[in-house]
Structures are given as structure tokens and as C-alpha cells.
């Protein structure tokens, strides 16, 4: 499974490279926002678990890369909490468009532009229905802060990880 996972990463890397080359060749690289993310990670045997939909970093923490050479500093790395719900307001703001007040998510365009590292105090996690394919026999909800990960299962004990004291979430 790990070899297949790495093969998928390599194939994806190749395709992103092709896309970036075309943007460069067509003169559009400097003023095109490229976002790279994923909907989930994979446990790959960590904690004795497989697949996704788990309240552990291996499953829940995903890459979040934003590239826009004309406006975003190259090589910048931040540990700002970010959720997929933050992507639409952030992209609207980066494009200079108004973010509707009723839109969920945080506008993190200032973080992307290197003006601040301040973001939301917490992001939400959750699996709302059971899924036998990933051995999820009941739903759970969770929250992640800079320091903690908490998840409450419907009929099982909850979990609370202090990610500073226990970065492997054991």
C-alpha cells in the first residue's frame, strides 16, 4: 500500500509539473493562482489503522499549497490552521472580488500574501455517516486547534490529543 501511495504521489507530481510548464510556456505562470490540496490523507497502518476518515493527523491533515508568483512570496511556509471551507473566501479575496458576508470560512488571503500568519483559532473535522469500507462504524465530530485535536464518537469514547506533548497522537 505504501508503494502504491508513493507511486500515486509521483504520478501527481509529474502532472502538476506538466501544468506548471504549460503555464510558463504560455506566459500565464506569473498571474495564475495554482492551488494544490487533497480531501484526505491515509493512515497507511499508523495506529494500526488503514484508509481515511480518522481523527488522526495522518488522515485529517492535508497539504495546502497556493502558488501565485505575482502576489505570493516564494517559499513561504506557515502553520496557520486552514480548512477546505476557507478556500472559496480566500480565492475570492486574492482575485480582488468581494467575499459575501454569508459565506462560511475564513479569508486567509493576507496569510497567503505573507502579511500575517494569523488565522482561525480552530477548524472542524467530521465524518457524518458510517462507512464500512474504511472501518468507520459510527459518525464522529472533531475540532483541531494549534495545540489540540479532539474528536467525539457517537457511541465510543472520545479522543483528545495534545499535539505538542504527543505529536504522534499516541
Image: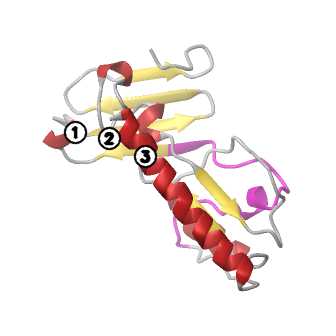
Question: At x 30% / y 26%, what residue is drawn?
Answer: 49
Which label was assigned to residue 53? Answer: 2
Sequence-first disc among 3 and 1: 3
Query: In x, y percent, where is residue 80?
Result: 68, 44
Please tell me whether residue 46 is drawn above or below residue 68 in the rendered image: above
- Gap between marks 1 and 2 measured at Cα: 7 Å
Q: Is residue 96 visible?
A: no
Label 2 sits on a secondary structure element that is: loop
User: How is the rendered protein coloured?
Assistant: secondary structure
- On the rendered structure, is 66 left or right of 69? left
- Residues at marks 3 and 1 touching, judged by CB atoms closer than 8 Å: no
Foreground residue, 62 or 153? 62
Measured Cα–Cα span from mark 3 to mark 2: 21 Å
Classified by dominant secondary structure, the portion drawn in magenta counts as loop
Q: Residues within 10 Å of mark 3 (few under 14, many from 20)?
A: few
Give the residue pinned by disc 3.
7
Q: Which residues fall within the magenta stretch? A: 102-123
Sequence-earlier tag: 3 or 2 = 3
| Residue 106 x/y as whole percent | 62, 59
Of circles 3 and 2, the one toward us is 3
Labels 1 and 2: the sequence-earlier one: 2
Q: Is 119 situated left or right of 166 in this image?
A: right
Question: Is residue 25 something one can see in this rendering?
Answer: yes
User: Is residue 161 within the magenta segment?
Assistant: no
Gap in angstroms between the C-alphas marked 3 and 1: 21 Å
Lateral position of residue 113 relative to residue 145, left or right = right
Q: Which residue is mark 1?
A: 134
Q: Secondary structure at mark 3?
A: helix
Q: Quadrant of residue 31?
A: bottom right
Amino acid at each position: 500500500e505504501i508503494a502504491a501511495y508513493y507511486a500515486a504521489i509521483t504520478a501527481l507530481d509529474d502532472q502538476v509539473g506538466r501544468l506548471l510548464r504549460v503555464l510558463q510556456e504560455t506566459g500565464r505562470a506569473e498571474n495564475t493562482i495554482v492551488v494544490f490540496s487533497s480531501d484526505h490523507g491515509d493512515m497507511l497502518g499508523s495506529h494500526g489503522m488503514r484508509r481515511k476518515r480518522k481523527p488522526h493527523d495522518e488522515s485529517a491533515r492535508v497539504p495546502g499549497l497556493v502558488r501565485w508568483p505575482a502576489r505570493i512570496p516564494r517559499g513561504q511556509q506557515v502553520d496557520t490552521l486552514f480548512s477546505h471551507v476557507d478556500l472559496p473566501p480566500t480565492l475570492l479575496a486574492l482575485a480582488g472580488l468581494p467575499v459575501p458576508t454569508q459565506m462560511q470560512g475564513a479569508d486567509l488571503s493576507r496569510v497567503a500574501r505573507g502579511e500575517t500568519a494569523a488565522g482561525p483559532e480552530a477548524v472542524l473535522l467530521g465524518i457524518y455517516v458510517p462507512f464500512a469500507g474504511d472501518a468507520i462504524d459510527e459518525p464522529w465530530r472533531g475540532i483541531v486547534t494549534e495545540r489540540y485535536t479532539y474528536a467525539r464518537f457517537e457511541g465510543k469514547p472520545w479522543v483528545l490529543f495534545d499535539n505538542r506533548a504527543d505529536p504522534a497522537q499516541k
